[in-house]
Amino acid sequence: MTAAGVTVVVCAYTLDRWAELESALDGVHADPVSHEVVLVVDHNDELLARATARWPGVRVLPNRGRRGLSDARNTALQAVRTELVAFLDDDATPSAGWLDALLAPFADPHVVASGGVAHPVWPDAGRPDHLPEELWWVVGCSFHGQPDSPERVRNVMGCNMAFRTAPLREIGGFNVDLGRVGTYPVGGEETEACLLLGRRDPAARISFVATAQVHHHVTTGRTRFGYLVQRSYCEGLSKATLARHAGAGAALATETGYVRTVLPAAVLRELRHPRHGLPAAAGIVASVLAAGIGYVRARVVPAAPVTARQPLASLVEEPA
């Protein structure tokens, strides 16, 4: 382990986000907390070459495993030399003080992970009417109704999170059967990792840090109603897969309360203002239906073979 104590990991897969990637790494480099930086490029040789030339002070690595975000993160996890590892999306820009705030909970030895807030950066057209704040998870941002207890939450948000390196390696890192591949919006790998960390050590805690903030860029494509439906459907698929891996109770505990209380209240609120609230209410209903269809489909279709989980080995050579 190095004296720095933390490595910031950014994973990238496309040149289409080059400007956002520059903003993310500029923000990381501006952070006063001492840290290393690792950029993992997911099976894109052109991006790998360009990033290596652009950031000579960054450890730029190719994804050594399966294409997708999970194994890109696992590549970094095997390469880091620090006790803590923080993950930032390639289209998220950290606010001032982000890293210091994100790492503060680790002063408690029982904290194994921490996560922060993601504010949406909407395209020029602004926030679409069909995406009320309850649905901002669709675009990878913090949303109204999410658990936000600083003492203990079930899981962290992937665009803004940190872990103790050793326990995360011990559980096998991030599940390659879950997680986004390119633009296909599946997920759940962070939730499963957090659940496994809790099983590994019942005293382990996952902390939410409201002051650890990033600004997550939202593309025009993700503001379309069709993306809302697709993302919600894939969320249902992901939750069904997660339920097979971790059990339905753990996989859906947070979502059950959200669907039963938060979303109905939001629909009623929006319907009081039908002139501008109808699109938001329709978005909520469509999201729930699409997620439900995805969940049921994944539960009734025979499951693909599960990839065996093994602890991740460190690929760092420790000094003699």
Image (cartoon, grey):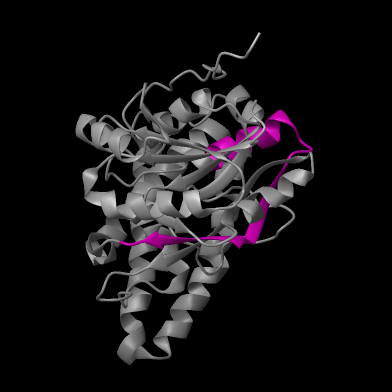
- In the picture as drawn, the residue positioned furthest to the top comes out as 320
Residue 248, relative to residue 121: is it above or below?
Answer: above
Q: Residue at x 37, y 76 (%)?
A: 281
Tell me residue 17's x, y (percent).
Answer: 27, 50
| 21 on left or right of 201 | left
Q: Could you tell me if residue 177 is visible in this image?
A: no
Q: Residue at x 51, y 23 (%)?
A: 78
Quarter of the image containing the C terminus? top right
**Magenta residues (range):** 191-218
Out of 234 and 249, give the one closest to the viewer: 234
Magenta span includes 215: yes
Instruction: Give the image quarter of residue 300.
Output: top left
Residue 127, relative to residue 18: is it above or below?
Answer: below
Tell me residue 30's x, y (percent).
Answer: 50, 54
Q: Residue at x 34, y 47 (%)?
A: 234
Residue 8, relative to residue 27: is it above or below?
Answer: above
Out of 299 and 313, give the one closest to the viewer: 313
Tell me residue 141's x, y (percent).
Answer: 45, 61
Tell me residue 312's x, y (percent).
Answer: 54, 19
Q: Residue at x 47, y 84 (%)?
A: 269
| 118 on left or right of 280 | right
Quarter of the image containing the N terminus? top right
Residue 199, relative to residue 320: is it above or below?
Answer: below
Instruction: Give the image quarter of residue 92.
Output: bottom left
Magenta span includes 228: no
Q: Could you tell me if residue 168 is visible in this image?
A: yes
State the count of labels. 0
